[in-house]
């Protein structure tokens, strides 16, 4: 469970978005978008660096994850509908965006459609669109196929993974994101495990929808993005191979790629965090 207070934002009579704050309460605001799957609890990885750098991290559960209501018909293009209520509830007019892995499409969608609310973006080990990717890793193709053709099977698979993750050592989850789980500190490994379990605690809907939608055209016009976009990617990332990140850099006019040598998917998040926090602008 969150050590910090969980905030609940009613969106309408049937839906709510939950988020937790990390870092400095009166600091420079950023919204952190977790991976696929994921939850607001992954934001705890930023706590110390955010405190040190005067950054206020708003970490929501996307719809269908954690304590946020499922939105069965949402798409990548609807991302602003669950981020702007968080900004409004936190009394924030403009903020930066940090997105990890599967949070990437939603960060870019918000920047393209709600430019007045976003002032910079950091994409960490970010998922890349089909137009920027060669063939995806086999596991990603399988999950996308199940999400499209037999979503009930995928929901059952995620339920089983959550059951195991609750009962096993954090390495069960950490091993999905890194080639060397021994290199991940125990505290970080525990956060990654808690994030995974919380992602599926109440619904598997969020991950199923996202694996379905991000495997096809995102519907994001990258030419509409005119804020600074920093891409952080590990050279050894097998979850999202770096070739896709290089192509994405070329598709976004304001993007700059920063390569972390010898870093895999999770190591990219852990190693880039100090640089990302230091680079948050007022």
Image (cartoon, rainbow, N blue to C red):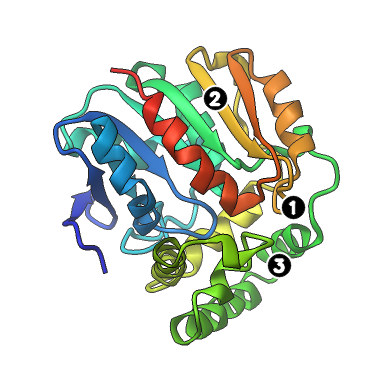
Label number found at residue 146: 3
**Are the residues tagged 1 and 3 within 8 Å (C-beta)?**
no
Closer-to-camera residue (239/51): 51
Q: Residues within 10 Å of mark 1 (few under 14, many from 20)?
A: some
Residue linked to disc 2: 230
Q: Is residue 245 left or right of residue 210?
A: right
Identify the image quadrant of residue 27: top left
Q: Residues within 10 Å of mark 2 (few under 14, many from 20)?
A: many
Category of crowding for the residue at label 3, using alpha-carbon neighbours closer than 10 angstroms: few (below 14), some (14–19), many (at least 20): some
Between 183 and 200, the one lying in front of the other is: 183
Element under label 1? loop
Query: What residue appears at the point 43 percent right and 61 percent down from the top-left corner?
Result: 188
Q: Residue at x 36, y 24 (%)?
A: 280
> Dots 3 and 2: beta carbons under 8 Å?
no
- Give the numbered dot on residue 144: none
Q: Does residue 45 appear in this view?
A: yes
Q: Which residue is mark 1?
A: 238
Whether residue 209 is situated above or below residue 77 in the rendered picture: below
């Amino acid at each position: 469970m969150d050590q910090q207070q969980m905030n609940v934002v009613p969106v309408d009579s049937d839906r709510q978005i939950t988020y937790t704050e990390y870092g400095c309460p009166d600091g420079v605001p950023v919204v952190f978008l977790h991976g696929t799957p994921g939850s607001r609890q992954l934001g705890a990885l930023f706590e110390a660096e955010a405190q040190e750098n005067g950054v206020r991290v708003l970490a929501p559960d996307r719809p269908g994850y954690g304590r946020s209501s499922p939105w069965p018909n949402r798409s990548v293009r609807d991302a602003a509908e669950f981020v702007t209520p968080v900004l409004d509830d936190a009394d924030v007019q403009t903020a930066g965006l940090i997105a990890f892995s599967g949070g990437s499409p939603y960060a870019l969608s918000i920047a393209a459609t709600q430019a007045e609310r976003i002032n910079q973006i950091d994409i960490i080990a970010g998922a890349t669109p089909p137009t920027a990717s060669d063939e995806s890793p086999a596991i990603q193709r399988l999950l996308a196929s199940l999400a499209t053709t037999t979503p009930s099977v995928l929901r059952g698979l995620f339920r089983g993974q959550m059951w195991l993750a609750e009962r096993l050592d954090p390495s069960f989850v950490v091993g999905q994101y890194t080639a060397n789980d021994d290199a991940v500190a125990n505290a970080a490994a525990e956060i990654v495990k808690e994030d995974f379990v919380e992602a599926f605690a109440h619904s598997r809907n969020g991950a199923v929808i996202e694996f379905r939608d991000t495997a096809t055209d995102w519907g994001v016009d990258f030419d509409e993005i005119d804020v600074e976009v920093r891409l952080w990617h590990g050279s050894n990332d097998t979850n999202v191979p770096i070739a896709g990140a290089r192509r994405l850099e070329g598709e976004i006019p304001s993007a700059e790629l920063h390569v972390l040598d010898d870093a895999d998917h999770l190591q990219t998040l852990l190693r880039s965090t100090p640089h990302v926090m230091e680079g948050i602008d007022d």
